[in-house]
Amino acid sequence: MIKGLFETHINVSNYEKSAAFYERLPGLIPLHEDAARKSKFYWIGRPGEAMLGIRENYPSPLVQRQHFAFRVELNDLESTRRMLHGQGISTTNFFGESDAPLSVFPFMPAVSLYFEDPDGHSIELLSMLPDAPRPELAIMPWPEWEETCGRTPGPAGR
């Protein structure tokens, strides 16, 4: 039985430039570099739980935009967002808005933010919410979700 996603690999145009980017993200731990294959591998979170691999021009020099999400704790979402901004990494909500509240996916429910790596790969930081799923609702701003759940939106939801 499948228990989760262990690893994902992405094709990058310059593995050294991409490695410098990914090593700025909190929770990615350098694991192994294979300079001959222009590859680098990272533990995601704790060693042995999940891995990300980057490889230059593999299997071809064409880099197709990919998407993947890292799970983060809800309490860490806003501080991680501020840390990314402090490093010059712009973040958006699901709709690509940088100055709007983060988006909630009611069918899960989860809240997330998005940013891109040097090759334009779409990276999502996702936090599950402690509420019951509401699949009948459309994607909405976090403050609206909080109101729907009967809570006053806090600073993280703005």
Image: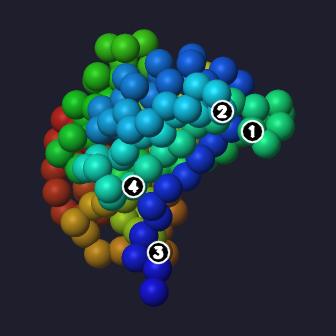
Residue designated by label 3: 135
Q: Earlier in the sequence, mark 2 or mark 4?
A: 2
Instruction: Tell me, for residue 149, which label it has, or none.
Output: none
User: What x and y, as percent, mark residue 37?
Assistant: 66, 32
> Could you say which is closer to the camera, residue 116 or residue 111?
116
Residue at point 29%, 75% (across, down): 132
In the picture of the structure, the residue carrying the numbered disc 4 is 50
Considering the numbered disc 3 on the image, is that residue within a helix, a strand or a loop?
loop
Three-letter code for the amino acid on which mark 3 is drawn: Pro
Residue 151 image point, x, y percent = 17, 57
Is residue 100 visible to us here? yes
Which of these two is toward me, 130 or 53?
Answer: 53
Label 1: which secondary element: loop
What is the crowding at mark 4: few (fewer than 14 residues within 10 Å), some, or many (at least 20)?
Answer: some
Check disc 2 and report the residue beneath it: 37
Instruction: Please tell me which residue is depicted at 35% across the width and 52% down the height of the picture.
Output: 71
The relative height of residue 63 versus residue 152 in the rendered view (above or below) is: above
Question: Does residue 39 sit above or below 132 in this rendering?
Answer: above
- Indicate the position of residue 78 as horizontal and vertical percent values: 25, 35
Q: Is residue 38 left or right of residue 145?
A: right
Identify the residue position indicated by label 1 in the image.
58
The colour scheme of the drawn protein is rainbow
Query: Which residue is located at x 28 percent, y 24 percent?
Result: 82
Q: Which of marks 3 and 1 is in front?
A: 1
Mark 2 and mark 3 in contact? Answer it, CB < 8 Å.
no
- Mark 2 vs mark 4, foreground winner is 2
Q: Distance between the residues labelled 2 and 3?
A: 44 Å
